[in-house]
Image (cartoon, rainbow, N blue to C red):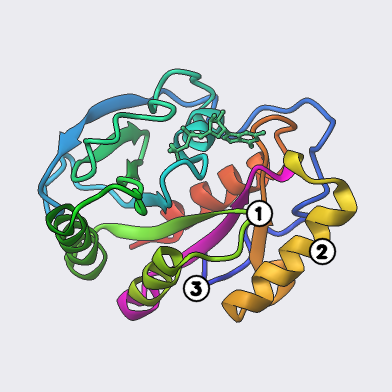
Amino acid sequence: MTTGGRPGGGAAGQRGEAAPFVSPLAALPVEFVGSFPDPLVRLEPALPEIAFIGRSNVGKSSLLNALVGRPGLARVSGTPGKTTLLNAFRLPGFYLVDLPGYGFARAGKAARAGYRQLVTRYLRERPTVAGVVWLLDVRHQPSPDDREMQALLAESGRPVLVVLTKADKLTRSARAARAGELAAALGLEEDQVQLTSIRSRLGIDDLAQSIVAATGDSP
Ligand code: GDP
């Protein structure tokens, strides 16, 4: 996984759309470790971790569930109040960490500041972060909140994988065009963003492979 880098290699965005396959993560045991308010919480054992982050409703819980092949693991459309907890899931050799979604329209100033502090400290200071999967809805231009996240991610220097969700909501040609537009809007090459859909399972295998590779590469 490299900054803004292409996941997994292969024909991302094309392969696996119709063919049945199982995410490489789905064969692995997965355990919910807990929900934590402290971005520097020590998880035992210390293992590399991959964090998932994105605007609320972007499809983060759905994608996590699809990746590990457990429909109910991360809560879909989870409780809006729980904006300051990170959820950790342990797989053999690494953790997946679900960071709270951002961009709640009704979130007050204090909640936004608390959120920002959690994510900033997590990204800047946590020693075990091997990579960040940043999710954007393929249909929308990056919001001001997304831009703020982009800046935080860039500043953190963490390896980031950009994932575009809900690709099934667009036709094949429209989604390719949107991937290009979004990549341009983010200052990336088109092949540096990964299209995904939990409905067609587009891109999920590639993403799972990238995650396994990133955690394996990590010291
Ligand atoms: P979160 O708030 O980021 O965790 O988002 P959720 O996983 O709760 O998803 C928000 C909504 O988007 C739910 O109604 C999901 O069913 C829907 N959704 C998520 N991923 C996809 C996808 O790939 N395709 C479609 N069509 N809907 C999706």
Q: Quadrant of residue 159?
A: bottom left
Mark toward the viewer: 3 or 2: 2
Tag 2 residue: 177
- Alpha-carbon distance for marks 1 and 2? 10 Å
* Label 2 element class: helix
Q: Earlier in the sequence, mark 1 or mark 2?
A: 1
The reply to whether the magenta stretch includes residue 160 is: yes
Left or right of 126 in this view: 54 = right
Mark 2: which amino acid? Answer: Ala
Where are the magenta residues, as a range?
153-167
The circle on residue 138 is: 1
The circle on residue 158 is: none
The reply to whether the magenta stretch includes residue 159 is: yes
> Could you say where residue 111 lies in the image, as x and y percent from the top left?
17, 52
> Could you say where residue 30 lies in the image, as x and y percent from the top left?
38, 25
Mark 3: which amino acid? Answer: Thr
Quadrant housing the C terminus:
bottom left
Name the residue: 23% across, 43% down: 83
User: Closest to the observer: 55 or 120?
Assistant: 55
Ligand 1 is found in the corner quadrant, namely top right
Tag 3 residue: 3
Q: Determine contact: label 3, label 2, CB under 8 Å.
A: no
Name the residue: 75% across, 32% down: 200
Q: Earlier in the sequence, mark 3 or mark 1?
A: 3
Q: Residue furthest right?
A: 173
| Disc 2 residue: CB within 8 Å of ligand 1 | no
| Disc 3 residue: CB within 8 Å of ligand 1 | no
- Alpha-carbon distance for marks 3 and 2? 22 Å
